[in-house]
Amino acid sequence: MNIDGSKNKGYYLKKSEKTSILERSQIPMEQMRSSAAQVIVSIIPIVGIVMGSVVVFFYLLWNHKRRTLLIKAGQYQRPEFDLLSFSLLTGLLLTTVGLAMTVFLAIALGVNFGLLGGIIPLAVGIGLLTYYGIRRGDRPS
């Protein structure tokens, strides 16, 4: 015997049994999604990820070709990267986001493992700000 009380095995139900099962279900017909809608909802993120990957791939490819041509022409200048400014900006952003998430999660969920979602960026931000503070004193005027 099946869960619904019928003696049929597997998926082979008569039409009258299918309608009685649907009538007994607790989900109204207005709330049930069609199979086409479920397929569309499933495909949208996949297409977005694929298209994003294609865009990133071509950006990297064209940037590589541009640099290669600049190097062959002898016009390539390596861009300078200011690590102190980067660590200050990233540290401030991570600290403020981590602090806001920690406070929100502590209020919403209490003290549990979910709180790590705010504590980890907070700790990384504080570490970057500490690095900035230490290295700033070493910088020549």
Image: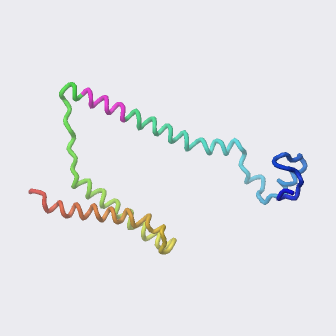
Magenta stretch: helix, strand or loop mostly: helix
Q: Quadrant of residue 136?
A: bottom left
Which of these two is toward me, 9 or 21?
A: 9
Which part of the image, by quadrant, shows the N terminus? bottom right
Which of these two is toward me, 100 or 62?
A: 62
Residue beneath the point at 26% across and 56% down: 87
Residue 77 versus residue 18 in the image, above or below: above
Q: Residue furthest left?
A: 141
The image shows residue 128 at horizontal and vertical percentages of 27, 61
Which of these two is toward me, 31 or 126?
A: 126
Residue beneath the point at 61% across and 44% down: 42
Colour convention = rainbow
The image shows residue 44 at horizontal and vertical percentages of 58, 42
Q: Residue furthest top?
A: 73
Residue beneath the point at 37% across and 62% down: 121
Which part of the image, by quadrant, shows the C terminus? bottom left
Instruction: State yes or no: residue 68 in magenta.
Output: yes
Magenta residue span: 60-69
The image shows residue 25 at horizontal and vertical percentages of 80, 58
Residue 94 versus residue 53 in the image, above or below: below
Residue beneath the point at 55% across and 41% down: 46
Residue 21 versus residue 57 in the image, above or below: below
Instruction: State yes or no: residue 117 in magenta.
Output: no
The image shows residue 109 at horizontal and vertical percentages of 51, 71
**Taking 139 as reference, is 95 left or right?**
right
**Count of marks, rendered view:** 0
**Taking 37 as reference, is 15 left or right?**
right
